[in-house]
Amino acid sequence: MKALLLLVAVGLCWAQYNPNTKSGRTSIVHLFEWRWADIALECERYLAPNGFGGVQISPPNENIIVTNPQRPWWERYQPISYKLCTRSGNENEFKDMVTRCNNVGVYIYVDAVVNHMCGSGGGSGNGATCGSYFNAGNEDFPSVPYSNLDFNDGKCKTGSGEIENYNDVNQVRDCRLVGLLDLALEKDYVRSKVAEYMNNLIDIGVAGFRLDASKHMWPGDMKAFLDKLKNLNTQWFSSGTRPFIYQEVILFS
């Protein structure tokens, strides 16, 4: 897998707009789909000695297992729970990676998938990377837990429940993106579960987050759950340091 470099400007930044990289380190490498154990070695053997500032990782939370097609990259963008086990590794391996990378000054930035859960056609059972039970048809995700009360079905005004017009901001933010079950982030309960997941990662030692599908969330909802985030872990970051937040925004879907 080729490493894709994301150049991060560090001048005139503050609060959660500061990438938190060490002085003189301005580049974050995207190690897409790498295993946590391999990222830890890469931090120690190559990234730190060559002045890299951090690593953006693939989503670390439990996702649905897709077998048709066989285990595509995009299964990682269909959450089942916020447990930390994927084909990249388990929770202990994740913690070990964060610790080892942080210890050599290469920080971890998590791809956070919080706009939605898995697709509505995902079925039911224990076919997820941690083995958690779910029922996509009933919108039941007991390992979070989320129920059908925690999704935007009642707000979406299209006949299909899908985004049908990308020029309609209400559809883009309240309806399902390619069938993915759209979370009701206006609810404080949902915001709190998202923040709980992200705060667990902050406690482990991550430096920031890429917000997946951010154009599909209302800005006020994003602000609400981001306001619930803790400051970064003082084992590696100065007291009061905020997590770096950056967003995925694409022009067309």
Image (cartoon, grey):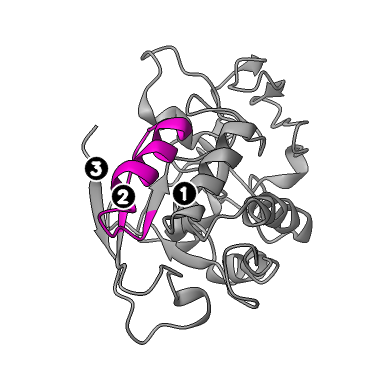
Residue 153 in which image quadrant = top right
Query: Disc 3 on helix, strand or loop?
Result: loop
Which class describes the residues within 10 Å of circle 1: few (<14), some (14-19), or many (20+)? Answer: many
Q: How many marks?
A: 3
Residue drawn at 53 percent across, 27 percent down:
89
Is residue 211 left or right of 82 when viewed as pictured?
left
Q: Please tell me how crowded label 2 is: few (under 14), some (14-19), or many (20+) other residues with Cα within 10 Å.
A: many
Does residue 26 sit above or below 212 in this rendering?
below
What residue type is disc 2 on? Answer: Leu
- For this rendering, which residue is in front, 226 or 236? 236
Let me know if residue 39 is in the magenta part: yes
Q: Residue furthest left?
A: 2
Q: Is residue 185 left or right of residue 164?
A: right
Residue 181 can be seen, yes or no: no
Q: Amino acid at mark 3?
A: Ala
Q: Is label 2 in contact with label 1 (beta carbons under 8 Å)?
A: yes
Q: Earlier in the sequence, mark 2 or mark 1?
A: 2
Which amino acid does the dot numbered 1 rest on? Cys
Rendered location of residue 125, percent (x, y): 68, 14
Circle 3 residue: 3
Q: Which residues are magenta?
A: 28-54
